Image (tube, rainbow, N blue to C red):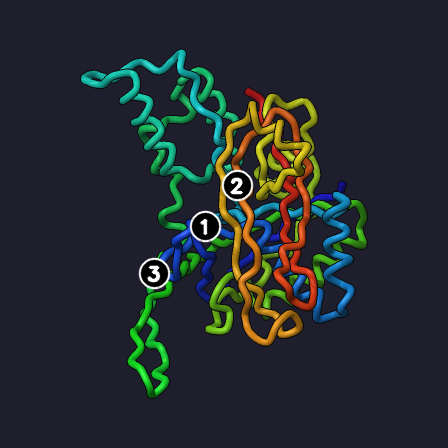
Amino acid sequence: MLFRLYKLRFLTPVRFGDDGAAAGLDQARLAGRADTLFSALCSEAAMLSAAAPQRLAAAAADGNLLVTDLFPYRGETLYLPRPLLPPDTAWQQPAAGRTASATAAHIKKKLNKLPYLPVRLLPAYLYWLRTGDSSQFDLDNANAIALSDIAKFSAVRVNARVDGERQTLPYVVTQYQFGAGCGLYFVAAAADQDLLDWIDRLIASLSYSGIGGKRSAGLGKFELAEDPIDMDETGVYADDAALYSLLTATDADWYMALSCLWPLPNEVALLADGFYSLTARGGFVASPAYAPSAVKHHSVHMLAAGSCLKAKAAGQVGDLAAGGKHPVYRYGKPLYAGLKL
């Protein structure tokens, strides 16, 4: 497979909806899921021809085209999701005045505040999980790698239109504005150069349409921060070379999903020995060719990026259309980072 890295610099605020069942416009995520990215690429492909989305979905379903989630970057530093592997209990000593279970809960609470880690820090973090050695990774001082300063979270009050018959109330839309030198990146893996070049063209088109929610209000517009990086073991920066090594690892102890995973029925057994988080993926189809107005499509639960399995599950690309005039593809085939403990 060929790997290409794309760094997006956002020109406007961007909004990715939260995954909770009761999540509304007042909740948002910093980064986007791979299925959101793939759906956006399908929408751009549909403007080329009616058959283009089917070609894109077929390439993904066959494993010839895969994409990661959108992850944060700051300058040359690339972030990955924190692996959902638990710390080894052998080194966890109860703190003064705490029981063993309270100490474990305290560690878990601190880890939950670290959704992402710099690629360069991943080996030290994995070593800490196994040994508790804080000489290279210190959980108590991990705020230095937190992402609180990479993007500014804001809530914008929107005044709804009044239809003349009933009074409408204003509502709040949450969004992120990335700071200078910061943004989101993703990796595309393809079986041949032509597929990667097609992704180049779709991303160029998508930059004008925008990605995420509330695009009609101008959100989600971006440009490429630099030319796409064709990844290899040498790398342009230290982090992309390290990431390439993780993507191509074949003898790892664990495989961490870098995209949402929708396992096939015969792959569910692989989850028994894994550590994972589930995310509900739903939404609306905003395509005039599908229906005159936005229509809610079927939802599905997937494993979130950061989930770790002993063996790779291929996943699937499914059709979640609910009676519309064309398929609604949901992407659930991850790329993996091989982890050594």
Q: Amino acid at mark 2?
A: Ala
Q: Are there few (<14), some (14-19), or many (20+) residues within 10 Å of tag 1?
A: some
Q: In the drawing, does residue 39 fall left or right of residue 103?
A: right
Q: Quadrant of the C terminus?
A: top right
Q: Which residue is the site of mark 1?
A: 19
**Mark 1 to mark 2: distance in Å?**
10 Å
- Farthest residue, direction front: 323
**Quadrant location, the N terminus:** top right
Callout 3 crowding tier (Cα within 10 Å): few <14, some 14–19, many ≥20: some
* Residue plotted at (76% across, 68% down): 50
Residue 292 lies in what quarter of the image?
bottom right
- Residue that appears at 65% across and 39% down: 335
User: What's the residue type where badge 3 is placed?
Assistant: Ser
Label 1 close to label 2 by CB (< 8 Å):
yes
The disc labelled 1 sits on which kind of residue?
Asp
Q: Which mark is residue 154?
A: 3
Res. 201 image quadrant = bottom right
| Image x and y of residue 154, in percent | 34, 61
Q: Secondary structure at mark 1?
A: loop
**Any mark on residue 189, and which?**
none
Upstream in the sequence, badge 1 or badge 2? Answer: 1
User: Mark 2 = which residue?
Assistant: 304
